[in-house]
Amino acid sequence: MNEQEQKELVELLKQTVAPVDRELHHDLWPKMRRRLDEPWDSRSWRAVFSATKLSSVPWFDWALLAALLLGICAFPSSIPIWLYNF
Amino acid sequence: MNTHPYLRAYMAGIAAPTMFLLVALSGFLIARYTFQIPVPIERVIIFPMALVPNLFGVWNIFYLWLRPRPHLPIGFHGAILPFVLAPAGFLLATCSGFLVATSRGLVWFHQIAIPYALLLLVFCLALIAYYLVWKYLVGFFNEVMGIA
C-alpha cells in the first residue's frame, strides 16, 4: 500500500466512523446545585418516607399493617413460619 | 435499544426477600445458638435463600409480562404468591425433616407446635404481608428500575 492509498484509507475511515464527541455540551454544576437545593423529602428514596407520601397511604393499608403486627405479636410461635416463608 | 425490562423486573423482585433473608438468617441463628432450639440451619435456609427470592423475581417478571394485558394491581398480584410458596415451603420442610404434620397441627424443629387454626390465621396474615410488601416495596423497586 503506497502513501496515496494510505491517505485515501484514512479519509474513508474518517467518513465512515462518526466522530466521538468528548466535550460536554453544558455545565453540570447547575444540575448539581439544583440537586443539592432539593428539599430533603423530595429526593428519590427518601421520598418514600416523606410526609406527603405517607399521608397518601390509604387508611385500610394502615389497618392491615396494624393487624399484621398485632397478629405476629399475639402469636410469637408463628415467627418460624415468617422467617421460613418470606 | 433493548433495555432488558425483564432482567430489571427480576432484580426489582428479588430485592425485598434478599434483604429480609438477613433477618431470617439472624432469627434462625438466634434460635439455634441463643435459645438452643435444634434448627438445622443448613437445611432450613435453602427455601428462604434459594427459592423465595427467585420466585419473587419470576413473579415480578410475570407481572411485567401481564402489564399490557388485563391484570390485577401489584398488591393483589403479590398476594397470590403465598398460594404457591406455602405448599412449596411445606413440601420442602417435611422432606427435609424439620417439619412434621400431626393430627393437631404442625411441629417445627420437633419443638414448636402450631395448631391448624393458628396456621390458617397465619396464612391470612401472610396474604396481608405479601399484599403490603408487593404494593409498597416491590412497587417502589419497580419505580426505581424504571419499569413501574
Image: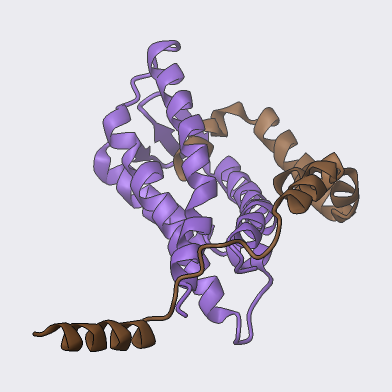
Residue at image point 60% right, 44% down: B122
| Quadrant for the N terminus of chain A in the image | bottom left
- Nearest the viewer among A34 and A42 is A34
**Image: B30 above or below A75:** above
- Nearest the viewer among B50 and B94 is B50
Image coords of residue B133 (percent x, y): 64, 51
Q: Quadrant of residue B139?
A: bottom right
Q: Quadrant of residue B111?
A: top left
Image coords of residue A86 (percent x, y): 50, 45
Specify the farthest residue to the left.
A1
Q: Is residue B84 left or right of residue A2?
A: right
Residue at image point 77% right, 47% down: A35
Residue at image point 26% right, 40% down: B96
- Nearest the viewer among B76 and B118 is B76
Q: How is the image coloured?
A: by chain
Image coords of residue B127 (percent x, y): 62, 54
Res B101 visible: yes
Chain letter for the purple colouring in the rendering: B
- Nearest the viewer among B18 and A64 is B18
Residue at image point 60% right, 87% down: B69
Q: Is residue A16 left or right of residue A41?
A: left
Chain letter for the brown colouring in the rendering: A
Res A86 visible: no
Specify the farthest residue to the front.
A3
Q: Is residue B89 left or right of residue A33?
A: left
